[in-house]
Amino acid sequence: MFKKVMKIAAGAMLAVAAVSTSAQALDNWPARGFSSTPSNSNSGFSANSFFGGGSGSGSQMVSFPKKYSAGQIIVSFADRRLYYTTGRGRAISYPIAIPKGEARWSGVLNVSQKKVNPGWTPTASMRRENPKLPAHVPGGHPKNPLGVRALYLGSTLYRIHGTDAPWLIGREVSKGCIRMHNSDVIDLYNRTRVGTRVTVTWNRFSTL
């Protein structure tokens, strides 16, 4: 049985866990030439060029346990992969960055909201930890830790989202959220509808 996902009542803990910034993103603020207005905030810009290196991908089609029906998301922190089932016995496997330490969690949720170029507001605790952080980073800005797309999970503050630090994909770096390459999160976003079932687990999966 999966452990229940942390309740919203644990507000302070979730607030910290929800924002998955990279260490480099924190260290580099204030960004050179940072402006509250992104150079291109519409949804049509190229993630490949605007988010330097963010176009990387390691996605592949794999075999997957047949108990999962098509159109589900299964996140394995042990595999450091996110699986999107395309049919019984088949799934697309994407590399992800996973939570570290006390930010680890598991549970079953649903996609409650989808956003293109989400804005990012660091928590008060994060700003106390690093006073250089801006109060808000607008969607479409190259220093936005959420990247180009975000899928919101249930009523929690957890998200599946892109990144401004693609070199960290595959590592234990986040504070609860699930990071993907920008090109991969765009692909997943386009396949996913609001209400999609998301299973987050530490189980490993045998795939070919």
Image (cartoon, helix red, strand yellow):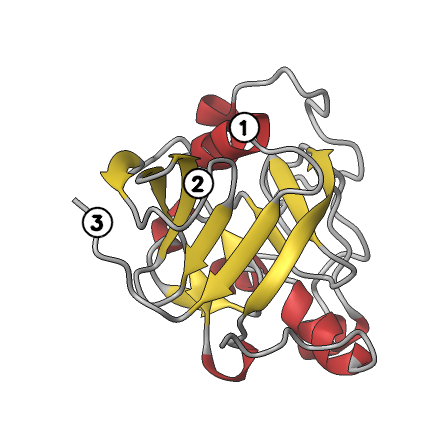
* Between discs 3 and 2, the one toward the N terminus: 2
Q: Position of residue 60 (x, y in %)?
A: 27, 34
Asked whether the residues under the numbered discs 1 and 2 touch, taking CB atoms below 8 Å apart as contact, a structural biologist would say yes
Q: Can you give x and y, in whole percent of width and height, for residue 135 in the image?
A: 81, 57
Picture layout, residue 185 above or below residue 206: above
Query: Which dot marks residue 207?
Result: 3
On the question of residue 68 being in view, the answer is: yes
* Residue linked to disc 1: 191
| Callout 1 touching callout 3 (CB < 8 Å) | no
**N-terminal-most mark, 1 or 2:** 2
The residue at 45%/67% (across/down) is 201
Say what secondary structure mark 3 lies in.
Answer: loop
Q: Disc 2 marks which residue?
A: 84
Q: Nearer the viewer, residue 134 or 21?
A: 21
Q: Is residue 164 visible?
A: no
Towards the viewer: 101 or 35? 101
Mark 2: amino acid: Tyr
Position above or below: 84 against 7: above
Instruction: Give residue 125's quadrant in the image.
Output: bottom right
How crowded is the residue under tag 3: few (<14 C-alpha within 10 Å), some, or many (20+)? few
Q: Residue 171 lies in what quarter of the image?
A: bottom left
Mark 2 closeness class: few <14, some 14–19, many ≥20 residues within 10 Å? many
User: Please, what is the three-letter code of the amino acid marked with disc 3?
Assistant: Thr
Could you say which is closer to the camera, residue 52 or residue 56?
56
